[in-house]
Amino acid sequence: MGYVSAVPVPPSRADSASPARRAGAGGGRRTLAAALLLAAAGAAVVLLASGQTWAEGHAAVGGGSVPLRATGQNVTGVPAALAIVGLAALVAVFAVRRAGRLLVSGLLALSGAGAALAAFLGADDSSALDEKAARTSGDAAETISGLTHTAWPYVTFVGGLLLLIAGLLALRFGAAWPAMGGRYERDGSPRARKPRAVKDPERPEELWKALDRGEDPTGV
């Protein structure tokens, strides 16, 4: 009675690398989803908060006073403009590769940082209301009185920070994200192999070799 010794077959390189590839693909998808969510939320917050009232006051007209208010757009149009630039940069991340992706990721981060900085600097600004007071009263030297500020500039600041974080994620993990018209090569899925042509379909050993490779020797 003969014995057949079981020789362990070492795993193929593709099989041994598949867990790492799957882990990398999962991390890429998570960072991609996080960046998309943060950028969309940040841009929406900046655009919404920029249209709200940032400051209020009164201008002396005749013997009374007129209430005046200034929106974020009156104070500074920079945050809203940079939010749109940031969204465009996020879309461009998927249209370019390598150095181009690095550049647009940096643009996204800079857009967020600029929007946050502009909102922070405009939080206690009074020049927009002073100009309105001068126009309303007809006196170029007239300034706003009873000036108060709202929390909307700080909401805009937070939106800018969200854009900044999305840009930093793109800088750090953007190389693993898919590109438009490209295949996500790190998804861990097996690539389709082109079946080899059977050298001599009339020889049984060639047919067995093709079957052993998992190919159809008939070519159907």
Image: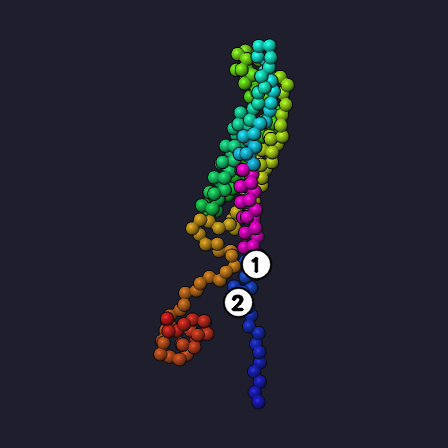
Q: Position of residue 102 (x, y in %)?
A: 50, 43
Please name the residue shown 60% across and 33% down the image: 155
User: Which secondary structure type mostly characterizes the magenta part of the structure?
Assistant: helix
Q: Position of residue 140 (x, y in %)?
A: 54, 12
Q: Position of residue 124 (x, y in %)?
A: 62, 25
Residue density around tag 2, few if under 14, some if 14–19, many if 20 or more, within 10 Å: few
Three-letter code for the amino acid on which mark 1 is drawn: Ala
Answer yes or no: is residue 118 visible.
Answer: no
Q: Which mark is residue 85?
A: none
Q: Position of residue 24 (x, y in %)?
A: 56, 55
Residue 32 on the magenta span: yes
* Label 1 secondary element: helix
Give the CA distance from mark 1 to mark 2.
14 Å
> In which quarter of the view is residue 79 placed?
top right
Q: Which mark is residue 20?
A: 1
Residue identifier under label 2: 12
Three-letter code for the amino acid on which mark 2 is drawn: Ser
Mark 1 or mark 2, which has the lower sequence index?
Answer: 2
Left/right of residue 113 with respect to residue 88 in the rendered view:
right
- Compared to 212, does 143 lie above or below? above
Please name the residue shown 55% across and 26% down the image: 71
> In which quarter of the view is residue 165 placed?
top right
Residue 157 on the magenta span: no
* Label 2 secondary element: loop
Magenta-highlighted residues? 23-44
Residue density around tag 1, few if under 14, some if 14–19, many if 20 or more, within 10 Å: few
- Compared to 21, does 111 lie above or below? above
> In which quarter of the view is residue 115 placed?
top right
